[in-house]
Amino acid sequence: MSSEQRRPSRERAASADWALYFITDTALAGGPDQVVQQVRDAIDGGAHVIQVRDKHLDDAAFRDLAAAVAAAAREKGEEVGRRIDVFVNDRVGIAAELGLHVHVGQGDEDPAAVREAVGPAAMIGVSCSRREHLEAAIAAGHCDVVGLGPVWATPTKTDADVPLGTDGLAALAARAHEAGLKAVAIGGVTARTAADVAATGVDGACVVSAIAGSDDPALVATFVRREFVMNQPLE
Ligand SMILES: Cc1ncc(COP(=O)(O)OP(=O)(O)O)c(N)n1
Ligand SMILES: Cc1ncsc1CCOP(=O)(O)O
Ligand SMILES: [Mg+2]
């Protein structure tokens, strides 16, 4: 086993359940309190990974939201007897302060600087929408999981790159796995598309609007997880 594979964050990534990864959206939820409730609901529906994402709150308000989500995830996780991993989107300093995992994109902080800030145990996610992004993430090290997408165009992120489609997603997921990274898919994932996403071989499906914009987040989470898990290729 290489030293890279023994790294604590890699071990954490290897033992995480990525199948359903819920990413919050404060506006779709209707406010920070509703975000926290949606996180509880998503966990009830089978999400084991949560990302706190808000592009508008100032740092103090975002920190409060991330802390409230982390506390709710811890409580809910204890209640249902599961480990829940919480990521912070973009704001590396807040992830470091709260002891949470962090997800960064191509325009965000460099993975080496992120690792310096969050230490060896926190997982680092990096967005990759093209092969060159993935090769750079692999070469730089530090990253534990890649967010591959958008798979399909989505109104949730209008500045996203060109969609990968399922063939492009499958090719990037295979390369990520070859390099020892976990791979999750993002962009247009719903209960209707989760089966096609699963068939590409990714480890998990990331969902924003299908859950955050739903009247019944727990039910949608249950459906997405079920579709994903039932359609994962046999190992
Ligand atoms: C799991 C996951 N994958 C990709 C993204 C997108 O990150 P990024 O490209 O930095 O865009 P923003 O989310 O910051 O708008 C993600 N957040 N999570
Ligand atoms: C953050 C992000 N990165 C690529 S697509 C996307 C948004 C995905 O949102 P949705 O699940 O609503 O399609
Ligand atoms: Mg980002």
Image (cartoon, rainbow, N blue to C red):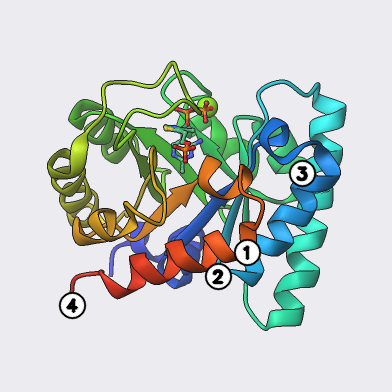
Nearer-N-terminus badge (3/1): 3
Q: Left or right of 16: which side holds 63?
A: right
Residue 164 x/y as whole percent: 22, 33
State the CA–CA distance, disc 3 to disc 4.
Answer: 36 Å
State the CA–CA distance, disc 4 to disc 2.
Answer: 20 Å
Mark 3 vs mark 1, foreground winner is 1
State the CA–CA distance, disc 2 to disc 1.
Answer: 8 Å
Q: Secondary structure at mark 3?
A: helix
Q: Secondary structure at mark 1?
A: helix
Q: Secondary structure at mark 2?
A: loop
Mark 2 vs mark 1, foreground winner is 1
Q: Is mark 4 within 8 Å of ligand 1?
A: no
Task: Tell me the amino acid under the disc marked 3.
Answer: Ala
Circle 3 is placed at which residue position?
Answer: 66
State the CA–CA distance, disc 3 to disc 1.
Answer: 20 Å
State the CA–CA distance, disc 1 to disc 4.
Answer: 27 Å
Task: Tell me the amino acid under the disc marked 2.
Answer: Gly
Nearer-N-terminus badge (3/2): 2
State the CA–CA distance, disc 3 to disc 2.
Answer: 20 Å
Mark 3 vs mark 4, foreground winner is 4
Nearer-N-terminus badge (2/1): 2
Whether label 2 touches label 1, CB < 8 Å:
no
Mark 3 vs mark 2, foreground winner is 2
Task: Tell me the amino acid under the disc marked 4.
Answer: Leu
Q: Residues within 10 Å of mark 2 (few under 14, many from 20)?
A: many
Nearer-N-terminus badge (3/4): 3
Q: Nearer the viewer, residue 154 or 18?
A: 154
Circle 4 is placed at which residue position?
Answer: 234
Circle 1 is placed at which residue position?
Answer: 218
